[in-house]
Image: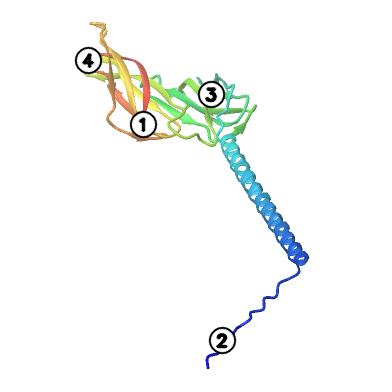
């Protein structure tokens, strides 16, 4: 004789009021966690650019070039030797040294001397050419040095080739970077101008040199960054 077996499953559920309270508490907890996460994320997002901006600002300030610079040259009196060779510079802002482009008038050779003392504005920086030589130009040298090719000073010298003498040796010296020299020359007989480039690349503070064609004169000199 076959009998049917009936299995009765009993499901016990929480009271409706209790379930509703638990659901509300869970939702409130999730909202609090979400709000806290958004607040933390917002602080990180705001603080990071602020720190970057401060870093960039301080770096830019440390590399700011001196401004409002005024230079002049004074006589030097050493016993019976008197020469126009004391170079001075004063700036309105920044820290700097002084650099002078000098010349030996007996040989015609030019060169650069740089002062060793770093001063802050508005103090005066001073350097003296070699004894008996004259200063032709004076410049402020930024401290710390700027990036790239900066602080370039140029001059021209006489070239002596047998009986041929012409003002055609072009030179340039910079405070920073690597560079060649470029000279704009002219043939005085024909009046034709042209440009010549030095082949040697030098690093600061070395001097780069190039010659105009024989008998021609240099009219301007520039540094070519490399």
* 3D distance between C-alphas at marks 1 and 4: 33 Å
The residue furthest top is 190
Q: Which residue carries the number 1 mark?
A: 179
Q: State the residue in front, 56 or 214.
A: 56
Q: Which residue is mark 4?
A: 163
Please, which residue is most extreme toward the front here?
1
The numbered mark at residue 164 is none
Return the x and y of residue 56 as percentages of the image width and height.
57, 39
The quarter of the displayed image where residue 49 is located: top right
Q: Is residue 144 above or below residue 45?
A: above
Query: Could you tell me how far apart the alpha carbons at marks 1 and 3 are, in whole angstroms?
Result: 28 Å
Frontmost of labels 1 and 4 is: 1
State the CA–CA distance, disc 2 to disc 1.
105 Å
Q: Earlier in the sequence, mark 1 or mark 4?
A: 4
Which quadrant is the C terminus positioned in?
top left
**SS at badge 2:** loop
Residue at 56% x, 86% y: name it: 4
Q: Is residue 5 left or right of residue 34?
A: left
* Disc on res. 86: 3
| Front position in the image: 73 or 84 | 73
Q: Which residue is mark 2?
A: 4
N-terminal-most mark, 3 or 4? 3
Q: Quadrant of residue 172?
A: top left
Mark 2 or 1, nearer chain start: 2
Would residue 26 appear left or right of 118 to someone viewing this image? right
Residue at disc 3, secondary structure: strand
């Amino acid at each position: 004789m076959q009998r049917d077996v009936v299995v009765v499953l009993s499901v016990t559920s929480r009271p409706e009021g209790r379930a509703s309270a638990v659901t509300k508490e869970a939702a409130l907890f999730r909202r609090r966690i979400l709000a806290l996460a958004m607040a933390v994320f917002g602080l990180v997002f705001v603080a990071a650019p602020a720190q970057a901006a401060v870093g960039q600002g301080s770096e830019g300030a440390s590399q700011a070039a001196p401004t409002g610079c005024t230079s002049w040259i004074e006589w030097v009196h050493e016993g019976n030797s008197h020469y126009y060779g004391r170079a001075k510079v004063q700036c309105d802002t920044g820290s700097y040294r002084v650099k002078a482009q000098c010349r030996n008038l007996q040989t015609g050779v030019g060169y650069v001397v740089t002062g060793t003392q770093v001063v802050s504005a508005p103090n005066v920086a001073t350097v003296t050419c070699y004894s008996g030589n004259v200063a032709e130009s004076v410049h402020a040298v930024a401290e710390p040095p700027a990036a790239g090719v900066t602080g370039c000073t140029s001059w021209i010298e006489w070239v002596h080739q047998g009986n041929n003498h012409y003002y055609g040796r072009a030179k340039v010296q910079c405070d920073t970077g690597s560079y060649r020299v470029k000279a704009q020359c002219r043939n005085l007989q024909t009046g034709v101008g042209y440009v010549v480039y030095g082949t040697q690349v030098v690093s600061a503070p070395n001097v780069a040199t190039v010659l105009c064609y024989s008998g021609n004169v240099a009219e301007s000199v520039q540094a070519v960054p490399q």
